[in-house]
Image (tube, grey):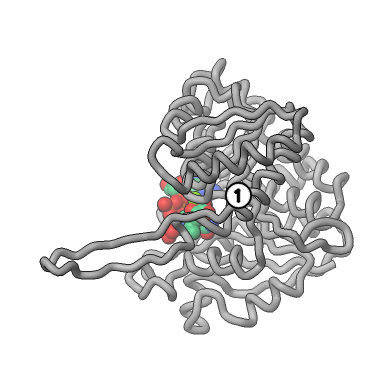
Amino acid sequence: MMIACLPGDGIGPEIMAEALRVLAALDLGIETAIADVGGAAYKAHGHPLPPETLELARTSDAVLFGAVGDPECDNLERHLRPEQAILGLRSALGLFANLRPATMFKGLEDMSALKPEVASAIDLLIVRELNGDVYFGEKAQRVLEDGRRQGYDFMSYAEDEVRRIAHVAFRAAQGRKGKLCSVDKANVLETSQLWRDVVIEVAAEYPDVELSHMYVDNAAMQLVRNPGQFDVVVTGNLFGDILSDQASMCVGSIGLLASAALGERQTASGTFGLYEPIHGSAPDIAGQDKANPMAMILSLAMLLRHSLGLEEAAVRVEKAVSQALADGITGADLGGSAGTTEVGDAVLARL
Ligand SMILES: NC(=O)C1=CN([C@@H]2O[C@H](COP(=O)(O)OP(=O)(O)OC[C@H]3O[C@@H](n4cnc5c(N)ncnc54)[C@H](O)[C@@H]3O)[C@@H](O)[C@H]2O)C=CC1
Ligand SMILES: CC(C)CC(=O)C(=O)O
Ligand SMILES: [Mg+2]
């Protein structure tokens, strides 16, 4: 089995190093291959997603991805910017289903941006569509006839795109508490109206799942008012991106939220996927031993579970993370003083 490891930019290499130490300690005999991606790849090869990196990802059993984004690259033409690498990987590899779990870890209740009694009930899964929506529609800037500049981005979903993510979400709900909330903006957007219609059609195949619908503005509010009401949330690319960052602060830090991006391709022992923390390259803390590596380490656990079928190893990693957090080993993002490597050491010591 081979994992393609793409550390990327900013804190990406720092947190990847900790995940790879955990993988090595598990001694599973898994091969790893490292390649440049994002701003680092642009600087070394002239492109954020060089063909060799894409080929390595394609031929691997799973991809472990750090983060991309580099302020020095923010003024490049859009197709050369670091962020295009992650969008390109998700699209080229057909990774349309993004699982973003958010759970309250024991001992961190006081670190939530919410009241501890509200935060302690959080155990939700955001299922975010990842290959469509306004992120992938035609976009440009142009000058109107009257001389004003205009920017536009085309938002759309085709019914098959909604149907396949809806199936993923209903199945996820079946494996959890049987509740699915579909989040959209159907009161304003036709894209969302189609989304809602198709989700309702798919629901007929899952009579055991309780389906509800919520407008995204209300969902943002409910997520801080009473996040315990949510089990599985299914939503589009843009809304899922925003709501998952919000969910992260409800459990204390964006440095805790892992994710899996899955498609249809099966590997020898699971589903091919790309695994990454939900956060970005955090240039404000890069190189300072301040990055929380837990989201990256938990992404490795998701990889072991979903792509390699190594449930026992995944649980071992998750338990070690929970234990380290319960023992109060946290960095500045969670009110503690441990550095990135120290947090990694704490996980290793509890494996
Ligand atoms: N999948 C990816 O690679 C993503 C890349 N980005 C890119 O990352 C760059 C920075 O974007 P931002 O909007 O600042 O989002 P960000 O997620 O990188 O950082 C937001 C805030 O959270 C903090 N933070 C993030 N991860 C942390 C961690 N593991 N431990 C402790 N604190 C952490 C940062 O220090 C910052 O204050 C941009 O270039 C952006 O485009 C943003 C999101 C996702
Ligand atoms: C960097 C972007 C392409 C996306 C993003 O913020 C995310 O996927 O969470
Ligand atoms: Mg995001």
Q: Secondary structure at mark 1?
A: helix
Left or right, 336 with reference to 186: right
- Quadrant in the picture for residue 308: bottom right
Left or right: residue 302 compared with residue 51? right
Spot the residue most to the bottom.
45
Rendered location of residue 98, percent (x, y): 63, 50
* Residue 90 percent across, percent down from the top left: 60, 63
Q: Which residue is mark 1?
A: 162
Quarter holding residue 131:
bottom right
Q: Is residue 286 visible?
A: no
From the viewer's side, name the closer residue of 160 and 251.
160
- Which quadrant is the N terminus positioned in? bottom right
Query: Does 47 sit left or right of 258 as displayed?
Result: left
Residue at screen point 60% across, 22% down: 228
**Dividing the picture into quarters, in which one does residue 202 lie?**
top right
Q: Is residue 93 above or below residue 273?
A: below
| Image quadrant containing the C terminus | top right
Q: Position of residue 55 (x, y in %)?
A: 68, 78
- Mark 1 is surrounded, within 10 Å at the Cα level, by few (under 14), some (14 to 19) or many (20 or more) other residues, namely many
Q: Is residue 155 above or below residue 108?
A: below
Residue 22 visible in image: yes
Q: Which residue is nearer to you in this view: 319 or 304?
A: 304
Q: Residue at x 70, y 64 (%)?
A: 63
- In depth, the one of 122 and 231 nearer the eye is 231
Q: How far across and down, in percent of the image, does residue 251 sit?
A: 56, 31
User: Does residue 150 appear left or right of residue 67 in this picture?
Assistant: left
The amino acid type found where label 1 is placed reads Val
Going 61% across and 26% down the picture, which residue do you hit? 122
Q: Is residue 151 above or below residue 336?
A: below
